[in-house]
Image (cartoon, rainbow, N blue to C red):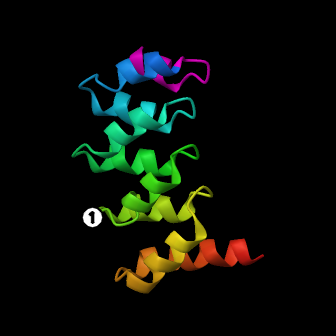
Amino acid sequence: MLGAVAEHLRTAPDVLSALAAVPEPSVRQTVALNARTSPGTLRILAGEGNASTRAAVARNRTTPRDLLAELSTDAAQHTRIYVAQNPATHTYVLVARLLHEADPVVRTYLQRALAQRAG
């Protein structure tokens, strides 16, 4: 039930903020994916220990660019991949990560993202 509320596109940002405090990780991950989740709530969710929640924040197209830049160095591979795939990620973040990324899978996603932007 809470997951359905968190997923609904008309759920108010203050309700999403309250749902972000629910202990169930799947609810917090759904909140992180919702485009109406406030930047402040996304920042809180990005700071938690659950890698899947951080990855969900990285997937959200409304995540602030500075937060995506922070998540681009996350320890979890899938979070870094979602940052590379997020169209809101600034191009300079993609280039910087490509220069420093050791993981060949993440490097592939970064290269693809840059190629798509180059047209």
Identify which residue, 41 or 81, lies in the foreground: 41
Quarter occupied by residue 116: bottom right
Q: Is residue 33 above or below residue 92?
A: above
The amino acid type, in three-letter code, at marker 1 is Ala
Q: Quadrant of the C terminus?
A: bottom right
Left or right of 19 in this view: 38? right
Q: Is residue 54 above or below residue 68?
A: above
Identify which residue, 85 or 45, lies in the foreground: 45
Asked if residue 64 is among those painted magenta in the image, a careful observer would answer no
Residue drawn at (49%, 38%), measured in percent from left and top?
A: 33
Q: Quadrant of the N terminus?
A: top left
Q: Position of residue 36 (x, y in %)?
A: 56, 29
Residue drawn at (73%, 78%), measured in percent from left and top?
A: 118
Quarter occupied by residue 75: bottom left
User: Secondary structure beneath disc 1?
Assistant: loop
Quarter occupied by residue 43: top left
Asked if residue 8 is among those painted magenta in the image, a careful observer would answer yes
Q: Which residues are magenta?
A: 1-12
Residue drawn at (40%, 17%), measured in percent from left and top?
A: 2
Kindly identify which residue carries mark 1. 75
Total numbered badges shown on the rendered structure: 1
Q: Is residue 85 above or below residue 55?
A: below
Q: Residues within 10 Å of mark 1 (few under 14, many from 20)?
A: few
Q: Position of residue 84 (x, y in %)?
A: 52, 65
Left or right of 85 in this view: 76? left
Residue furthest out toward the right: 119
